[in-house]
Image (cartoon, rainbow, N blue to C red):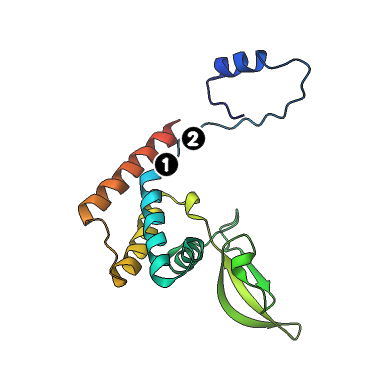
Amino acid sequence: MTFTGTRIELQQAIFNLDKETLYDIKIEKHRDKRGLQANKYAWKLMTEIGRKMTLSKEEIYTRMLSDYGILKTDENGEIIESYFSPNVDLFKIGSYWKFIEYVTINNEVKKKCYLLKGSSEYSSKEMYDFIQGIEQEAKALGIETLSEREFRLMIEEMEKEEKYEKRL
């Protein structure tokens, strides 16, 4: 069960729970899902690109992240990198990794890769840039995209939501 509410509403909900049952509770500050329209648009384009290229939308998403995405950094601002065996399929690892180059470490060839942020972590500016890259790919395949005006309005709405969330 997921419950969203104020402190008073949460207290009432907890008070109404069965007294004999053991519960796990995780409390997080509520955040509206920002950029849903932009996110839907990005996935719509990636799905259509996938159809044209006979690839899954997840494979296209990984390619788009690699081509137009943002590198993930640690708390010191350093790019997060890792080294993998050459036969490792980066698509199957679970996180999003961008192949950089082959390097030799202790006489072993390795894939040097950088970790990518998932698009759900993007700011409105990062999402704008990401979608513009996806649109370029879509246009090259003859896929219809939003007009510049429609695209700007969608991003402006996302920016408004982002500013509202920061005030909370």
Query: In terms of secondary structure, where does tag 2 sit?
Result: loop
Q: Are marks 1 and 2 in contact (CB under 8 Å)?
A: yes
* Residue 137 is at least partly visible in this image: yes
- Name the residue at 59% across, 19% down: 10
Q: Quadrant of residue 130 in the image? A: bottom left
Residue 87 rendering spot, x and y as whole percentages: 67, 78
- Name the residue at 55% across, 76% down: 100
**Residue count near mark 2 (Cα–Cα under 10 Å), binned few <14, some 14–19, many ≥20:** few
Name the image quarter holding the N terminus. top right
- Name the residue at 57% across, 26% down: 3
Q: Which residue is mark 1?
A: 34
Q: Residue furthest bottom?
A: 107
**Residue count near mark 1 (Cα–Cα under 10 Å), binned few <14, some 14–19, many ≥20:** some
- Name the residue at 60% across, 60% down: 95
Amino acid type shown at disc 1: Arg
Residue 15 rendering spot, x and y as whole percentages: 66, 13
Residue 147 rendering spot, x and y as whole percentages: 22, 56
**Real-space CA distance between mark 1 and mark 2, rounded to the nearest whole angstrom:** 8 Å
Q: Nearer the viewer, residue 68 or 94?
A: 94
Look at the picture and state if 41 lies above or below 84: above
Q: Which residue is mark 2?
A: 31
Q: Name the side, left or right, on which 15 lies relative to 73.
A: right
Look at the picture and state if 160 lies above or below 152: above
* Residue 35 is at least partly visible in this image: no
Q: Quadrant of residue 74 in the image? A: bottom right
Amino acid type shown at disc 2: Arg
Query: In terms of secondary structure, where does tag 1 sit?
Result: loop
Q: Quadrant of residue 4 in the image? A: top right
